[in-house]
Structures are given as C-alpha cells and as structure tokens.
Amino acid sequence: MKKRLLGTMILVVSTMLFGCSSKSGSEAGTSKESSKIVWAGWSGEEESTKPFINDLIHSYNSEAKDKVKWVGWPWKDTQQQLIIRNQGSEQLDVAQVDINMFGALAKMGLLEDINTLLGKKELSKTYEGSALKVGQVDGKQLGVPWSVASIGMVYNPTILKKAGYDNPPKTIAEFEDCMAKIKAVDPDIIPYGVATKEETMATDFQPWLWTFGGKILKNGKVTLDSSKTKDAMNWYKELLKNNFIQMNMTRFDARQLFAEGKLAFYDDAISAKGVAMQNGISEDKLAESIQPMERPVLNSGDDPQAAMWGHLLVVFKKSKNKEEALSFIKFVTSEKQALKYLNSNGMPPVVKSALSSDEVKADTWTKSWLDYSKTGQRLEFTVEQNGSELNNILVEELQGILLNKKSVDEGVTSASKRIDEAINQ
Amino acid sequence: MFEKSRGFKVFITIFAIVIGIFIFFPLFWMINTALKSPSKTYTVDLFFSSFTIDNFKNVLFDRQILTYLRNSLFVSFTSSFLSTIVSMFAGFSFSKFRYRGRASLMSLIMMAQAFPQAILLLTLYTMMQKLRLDGSYISLMLSYIAFVLPVGTWTLKAYFDQLPDSLIESAKVDGAGWFRIIFQIMFPLAVPGVISTAIYSFVWSWNDLLYSLTLITEDAKRTLAPGLVMKYMGEFNNNWAEMMAASIVVSIPVTIIFILLQKYFISGLTAGAVKE
C-alpha cells in the first residue's frame, strides 16, 4: 500500500513540476505584445478558418499602429462568453457574431450603433443593402455585415437525374413528385434532410412557413395561429408520413448523410460546398454531387423564400477604442480581404466593390447562392432577447405535432400561446 | 431466504446485464466510432466494416492535444493536491475541535455546494479579473478548489469522526504536540478518505469545460476539455471520429489512477455511513 501511495505521490509532484517548467507558446494575435483592440469570435479557433484569420490579423498588425489581439471560443459557447465578458470589465472591442447571437446581444443593449461612428451614407455606399439590413435593429446599425447570404437548399444532381429530374423542382407540387420518384428509385435514400431536431428545426421550418404565406410575428404580435401555419404543418406531416423526411435529423446528420449520397435535398448555408468536401466528396465530383437551388414555391410566380444567415462584426458599447475598432472592421470587410476569404473558405463578400468583381462573377456557386438570397429575410426570433427560448418552444410544438402527440390545431394553438407568453413575460 | 431463491438470482442477473448494457453501450459506441473512418461516422454499423486506427494515430501525433493533456494533468494534479490539503485541515478542525460558530460554518460550506456552477462563474470571473488572475492557472485552480472543498471537507470530517478522540488524548499524554498528532497519527489513519477526496477533486478538474473555457483564453494554456471541443466541434463540421479517439486516449490517465486507488475511494466515501 505504501509503495502504491509513494508512486502516486511521485507522479503528482513530477507532473506539477513538469507543468510549472513548461513554456507556453504564442500564436499570431495572441502574443503578449501590447494590443489595443481585442477581437473575439470562433473562426480563429476552427481548423478550416484559422489560417485565414491568423493571416488577416498578421496583415493588419504589420501595417496598423493599433494592434489586434484575438480571443476565441467554440462557436456554440461564443454568445455565453461574450455576455460574461461584457458583465465583467475585461477589454472587448470587436466581436464576430452570427445572426442569432447578434439578436440576443442587440436586445441586451450591449452594441454600439455603427451609424454614429461611420454614418449611414458611408455604410450604404460601401456595403450591399440586403446585407446591411441584417445588422439593423430598430433603425440602428448594430452590426456590420462580414459575410452574409442565406440558409438555402442544396440538391444532389446525380440522384435527381436518376429520378428523371434534370433541374431541381420549382414548385411544391414538383418537389413532392420529385421526392416520391427518388423514393421509388432507391427506398434507402431519404429525399429531404430537413432538420427535425434542435434549434435548426425552427430555422428550417420558417422559410416553409413563409412559403405557405404564414408568419410567426407581425408588427410585434404573434400571428402563428393561422390557417397558413396549419397548411405548412400538415404538409410537414404528409412528408413524414410518406417517409420523405425523418425525425431526429440535425444539420450535422444531414451534412454527413448528404456527403454519403443518402440524401437528395437539405438546407444549409453557403459554406455547404466546403462542408461536403470535408465530409468526403472529392473536388472533381462536386458539380455532380451538390448544387444550390431556389426553395420551391407554393404557386408559380411566388418569391422563393430563404432565411438570411451570416456573420457580422459588432462593436461593444463598453469599448474604449471604438474608432480603432471601426477601422479594423473596414480592413476585415475590405474588397481585398473579402475576396481572400471567399477563395480560402467560400464565404461571400458584402462590400459592393467585391460583389461586382470578376472573381465573384466567375464563381458560379457564390453567384447563384447570392441570387437566391435576394428575397431572403431574417428569422423571426433573431432580434428577440429570448430567441433561444422561443425557438425551443417552436421546436417542441412542431415535434409534438409530427410525433402525433398533438393534433395540428392543438399544436399550433399551443405554440402560439406559449410564444406570446414568452415574448410578453 | 428470498435472496437465495433461484428466481431472485435470475432477476438480479438480468437486471445486472441490463444495467451493464445501459452503462457500457455509450462507451462501446465511442470506441466503435473512434475505429471507423470519419465518413462512416453516421453509418449504423460496427467498426469491422471500415476498421482504421488513423484517428488514434492523428491524436497521438498531434502536439496540440499533447499540450492540452500536459496542461490538464498539471492543473488537475495541482488543484487536487491543494484542495485535499485544505479539506484535510478543515475536516479535522470540524471533527475534533469545538468552537463557537462551528456548526454554522459547516452549514455555510455545505450551502456553497448548492449554487449552480454557472451562477458562481459570474462572481468568480469578476473576482479573478479584479485580482488580475484571469488567464492564469491560479484562477482555474482556485475555482476548482472552491468547488471541491465542501464535499472534500465533509468526506474527511466523516472519516475523522470515526477515529476515536482517545488516540489524540493518549498521544498528548505521551508528549506529542498538535503538529505530530495531526501529521503522524491522525492524517495517516485517514488515508482512504484523503485519497477519495483527491480523486474526486482530480476528476472534477479534469472534466471541467465551463470554467476552463472562460478563465483561460490562450491556446497554449488550454486544458483538454475546451481544447478538444475547439479542435473537433466547429460551426459547420464536427469530427466525431477523432473526437472519440481523443476522448479515449485522454481518459486513460484518469482510468489508471482510479483503478489503482479505487478501494480507498470507496472506503473513503462510505466512511461514517454505518455507526457501530
């Protein structure tokens, strides 16, 4: 017993000494050198985007007087960490946020109005209008778009061809017919990988709700309990009954299954092509394996619906370096850096000069996706402070309906009531 | 009599098998995923169909993960060591001394355990900032010690309660001072309790994600839990296969320590459970 204890003690002490003696390295933008601007987010931590972010910070720091320091967390934890840091007194000037984080931070009153720093005219002269709108709340420009497109639909052309479709379906009727034919050709293929689990279920449902003419909120009032919502829900139920969609499908599941050729359609962001490659589709097979498409419409002539998606850059009210933060944002979104980001990670630019450049015009994937995003709108809970809670309510009720725990009428009424209570609490 | 009946034995066996499957299936699936190629992650089949050890190779030759491992070992061992020392003295004091406010203090320490970690994070984070300790291992270790102390103190108090006061009295008669009584008589007798507290503290520090993520932002200082999440769980893609391989590799040190010391852990936790 004594020998074992002695051994454990030696292990403990040697580990402590080893830890104490170890030297910590540093990366671009995270060194101990004095930095004036602190930039937070997640892209500087992810394998796929880290090289670009490091290079971007390095380029800025080599030219600018005010150096930038990067602080990062995993994507899922970024919102929580930004809030914690804002409640403390730690320096935080600029942050990368996605649309959902942006809404929560904006409603908490943590963000600076960029209009006061740069001016509306300058902003609208530089940035594309629909992208700018994504960062607006109550007439204030609380976020500068960095990379904005939509959550759109992608399809597998090879599978569609086998089902007799050379082009993707344009209307819901065609979409249903196409899915039925796919199922007939290969019963193992799940025709449509719409999310039926987690928050993405609410994200994927809303464009379909809009397609059927419904809205969750109108002028601050909950309008979910309508015949349009019930039509959309009955259509979802029909898809499930026909095995065109499956329960327990997350975005991550859909991405992997799509890459394995087991899904014909699913919803994703513009980065879907890069994700498909990471999941095993070789570059030479990309064109025949994944293509973007417009969401089918209810009636010919309707506007195809899409939920706006993207990353924004925000300046915190607490920042003491707002001007410096803004010049860094200008650098990040500049034509040169935006085109670099497009080439390295497929993230679309937002500045007008980059959008009209030959590189973007020649990039058919990006060009098509941006065209399909033109009629996109922001998800309805984006700028609600308790957006996450509202999404959860919607998901719970939708799942209840799909799993036959509630009728469509009961589920829609219950969802409407609960959302109303949560908004007005 | 009932315990010895055949029906009871069959029931217990089936029950044990069901519980065993319930506990070990996730572990099995973790190994299964780690031994498949990433493109087969979502395929519901066993690893024999696409067996690969590439995920383990990638993890073992990844210097970043080894850095996280080293950092986690350092933080966990140190905070475990320090929290055990403090718990030992606190437990001994509560058990063997009688002073005003003792009972209230004991309740107060226990109450600290009732607060959710996430709530305490806000206060601890602000406190560490004011003390300019954020970003340092000291902040992380202090937080871990704060969380482990209630359980550690009460575990060791229960252990010291079992040791008769007459031991202290006879040592005093033999001329031993408090220092000798504590270090040469009482603490050696409380080894199982000490070890169970140390293991509890170690595992707590090892598994923590939230505090490490908040208090440490420099990549070179990151511990395993946030390091692995950052490395494998992205906005667009999750590399489950390597994540599982890394999780298996990094759980080996904790498993070895637990296996070596498990009998002390169990006897330490059950101390004071039965009055004789």
Image (cartoon, coloured by chain):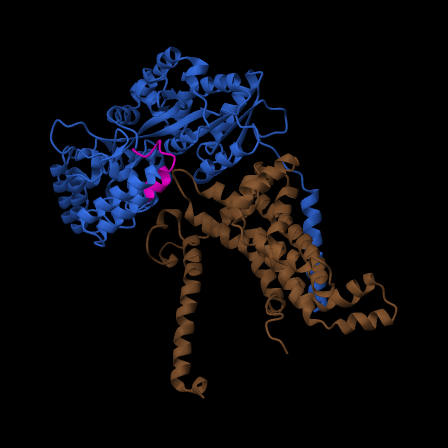
Residue B27: x, y in percent?
Answer: 45, 59
The chain shown in brown is which?
B
Q: Residue at x 32, y 33 (%)?
A: A269
Q: Is residue A388 magenta?
A: yes
Q: Residue at x 21, y 37 (%)?
A: A208
Instruction: Give the residues in magenta.
Output: A380-392
Quarter holding the N terminus of chain B? bottom left
The chain shown in blue is which?
A
Q: In the visual, does B120 lie left or right of A371?
A: right
Q: In the visual, does A182 lie left or right of B145?
A: left
Residue A415: x, y in percent?
Answer: 26, 44
Q: Is residue A360 above or below residue A217?
A: above
Q: In the visual, does A178 lie left or right of B226?
A: left
Task: Report which quarter residue A6 is drawn in.
Answer: bottom right
Q: Is residue A170 above or below residue B140?
A: above
Residue B88: x, y in percent?
Answer: 70, 59
Q: Is residue A123 above or below residue A78?
A: above
Residue A419: x, y in percent?
Answer: 29, 41
Q: Residue furthest front?
A: B100
- Front in this rendered view, residue B146 or B63: B146
Task: Report which quarter residue A413 is drawn in.
Answer: top left
Q: Is residue A168 visible?
A: no
Q: Residue at x 70, y 65 (%)?
A: B95
